Amino acid sequence: MPSVRKKILVPKYVQYILLPLALVLGLWFISILRTIIIMFLLAAIIAFVLDQPVSLLQDRLRFPRVLAVVVVWLILLGIVAGLIALIIPNVISELNYLIDQIPEYASRTELIAQDVQKWFTELDIPYKPDITPADVAGKLASGGEQIATRALGFAELLFSTGLNAFLVLVISIYMLIDARRLRQVVKNSIPPQFRDDAVLLFGRMQHALGSYLRGQLLISTVMGILGGIIAFYGGAGAYVFIIAVWVALTEVVPLIGPFIGAAPAIILAYFIVSPGRALIVALLFLAVQQLEGHILVPKIMGKSVGVHPLWVMFAVLSGATIGGLAGGLVAVPMVAIIKVLIDFCREEVVLEKWERPLLEKKTVEEGDSA
């Protein structure tokens, strides 16, 4: 005989009043403290994911909690520092080379623009551009000077971003150290009859977040390597590190990230080799993106998110509108959490049926309607 499980019954007064009121208050609270909330969400996501290796060191190797957190963070920071030491010097060297080559690319731009103007003339198509080829070349050549003039603003942005990242790091460390105490506080605040459900729900959320972040890291690495290989074939061998890092970073941006990542390699192939080579590079990136969408993402990411791309796009745009780049980045992990929450509610929550609907049809005689 199958066992009968008790479900969570939501009373009618909660459905009528408390849930809409909580939604309105929640949206108002988020609109006021959105930057702080996004920082704490990022810290919570990091702490959620790193809690598993920290707990492993604490339970299996009998490390104190603080020591386990320090060891995990030292390993993580060591990996990041090693990657930075390997990549950044090459990126800086390639950027310097790119700045030196700007005048040559400007000359090629002028020749290309002249060819386009000549082609329009041969076809008897009126072509009177507002910007002449010389103007295009001049603007491209002055790009290096504009970069120098905007260095101060970029430095301020970098400092602000670095400060926020440091605060997120500190908050996540505090969350990791006090994770078990915080978990116990939350557990004690939940009515006893719902605690097993809460443990089940948080376990699913942690698994979904870990799967998403690990999968995203692996996909970014693979796509960065493939992007570097395509750039090398496209004639941009002098900028392989820049393009590989750029492709890997833009993979974090959902939906539009792969197209943004492919743009530098296509443009450089156009200037360095030929328009035909640029077309081939674009087709190669398109093929790689198909490989990513049909093989890598289903195999690596699995069902960590498992929602329609339109919902993902809506979440990313909403997150970017609320909190800028950080909001857009945290949107997809939040979609994964919401998806787990919805699935949990479908399995475990039952809404108490209403005795009468809010709206209903009623038969009215024609004489009474006057």
Image (cartoon, grey):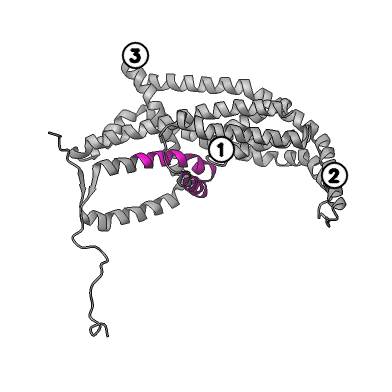
Quarter of the image containing the C terminus?
A: bottom left
Q: Which residue is mark 2?
A: 115
Q: Earlier in the sequence, mark 3 or mark 1?
A: 3
Nearer the camera: disc 3 or disc 1 = 3
Instruction: Provide the secondary structure element on which disc 2 rests.
Output: helix
Per the model, the C-alpha gap separating discs 2 and 3 is: 70 Å
Q: Which residue is mark 3?
A: 61
Estimate how packed mark 3 is, as few (under 14), some (14 to 19) or many (20 or more) residues with alpha carbons within 10 Å. Answer: few
The type of residue carrying mark 1 is: Thr
Rendering quarter of residue 42: top left
Where does the image place residue 265, in percent across and percent down from the top left?
69, 33
Q: Earlier in the sequence, mark 2 or mark 3?
A: 3
Per the model, the C-alpha gap separating discs 2 and 1 is: 44 Å
Rendering quarter of residue 62: top left
Specify start and end residues of the magenta stretch as a single range. Answer: 312-340
Residue 161 is tagged as: 1
Residue 175 is tagged as: none
Nearer the camera: disc 2 or disc 3 = 2
Rendering quarter of residue 283: top right
Per the model, the C-alpha gap separating discs 3 and 1 is: 36 Å
Where does the image place residue 237, in percent across and percent down from the top left?
72, 25
Please tell me which residue lies in front, 112 or 334: 112
